[in-house]
Image (cartoon, rainbow, N blue to C red):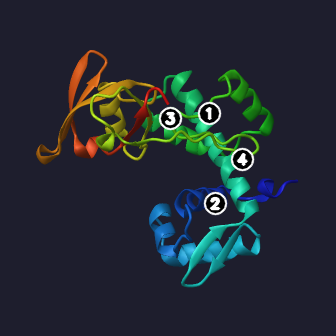
Amino acid sequence: MSIRGMLSQSVEDYLKAIYKLQDENWVSTSELANRMEVSAASVTNMVKRLSTLGLVSYTSYRGVRLTSTGEKIALEIIRHHRLLETYLREIMGYDWDEMHDEAEHLEHHISEEFEDKLDKMLGYPTHNPHGDPIPGRDGSIVQIDSEPIAVCPIGVALTVRRVSDTNTEMLRELEAFGLLPGATVKVLHDNSTGGTLTIQSGASHVELSLDLASHVFASPSEL
């Protein structure tokens, strides 16, 4: 049995959270406690256990980082999650919050055979409905450069590449404006002092608050 087959759902959730937080830095136990919504003491106990399993490197007062084994497992769970989100959203028509919650549950329970068949049925997608990259079976990730739409050039055709997935109400609002990944848009006017951007989305002109715009990432369409 692979090491992943011996891990609990809680352990897998920790590995996924550390991967998303670590970037180029070590992750503090307080950051991890906030992400997992548990006490710092609970996090310390868990990361010590993960260190014993060889899944993380942990140093007091410095924090935690995934080992190569821990990162491989985290990427596998993220791959499951994002493939499932794509299926639930595009094939089954789930709403944003339903899609995420269902994928959170199912990601821990699908087999590699199911994963492969799901990937093939979906046409081997590289990104999920939010525009986040779906790790390949080998852990590779297809990154598409993008930047917040508020700093994109005015009057240039842009393609929305990614939207933040932290707030379902925000996602519904962006969907209503036609500002989901794959959409072609233009910034027509930057009224930063007034707290808005004027965006052309399809045939519509949309006044987008800077707060909402901060969740939309785009790049020139010709890239």
- For marks 2 and 1, give the one nearer the viewer: 1
- Circle 1: element type: loop
Q: CA distance from mark 2 to mark 1?
A: 22 Å
Q: Where is residue 191 drawn, in percent x and y?
A: 15, 40
Number of other residues with Cα within 10 Å of mark 4, as a class: few under 14, some 14 to 19, many 20 or more:
some
Tag 1: amino acid: Thr
Provide the residue designation for mark 1: 126
Q: CA distance from mark 3 to mark 2?
A: 21 Å
In depth, the one of 208 and 145 nearer the eye is 145
Q: CA distance from mark 4 to mark 1?
A: 12 Å
In depth, the one of 193 and 21 nearer the eye is 193
Q: Where is residue 146 drawn, in percent x and y?
A: 45, 41
Answer yes or no: do the residues labelled 3 and 2 have beta carbons within 8 Å?
no
Tag 2: amino acid: Leu
Pick whichever of labels 4 and 2 is earlier in the sequence: 2
Tag 3: amino acid: Met
In depth, the one of 200 and 29 nearer the eye is 200
Q: CA distance from mark 1 to mark 3?
A: 18 Å
Pick whichever of labels 3 and 2 is earlier in the sequence: 2
Provide the residue designation for mark 4: 139
Left or right: 212 in relation to 117: left
Instruction: Looking at this view, name the residue that lies furthest to the top.
Output: 203
Answer yes or no: do the residues labelled 2 and 1 have beta carbons within 8 Å?
no
Pick whichever of labels 4 and 1 is earlier in the sequence: 1
Provide the residue designation for mark 2: 15
Residue at x 71% of width, y 74% of height: 51
Where is residue 63, by image quadrant? Answer: bottom right
Q: Where is residue 147 drawn, in percent x and y?
A: 40, 44
Provide the residue designation for mark 3: 99
Q: CA distance from mark 3 to mark 4?
A: 23 Å
Q: Where is residue 67 drawn, in percent x and y?
A: 71, 66
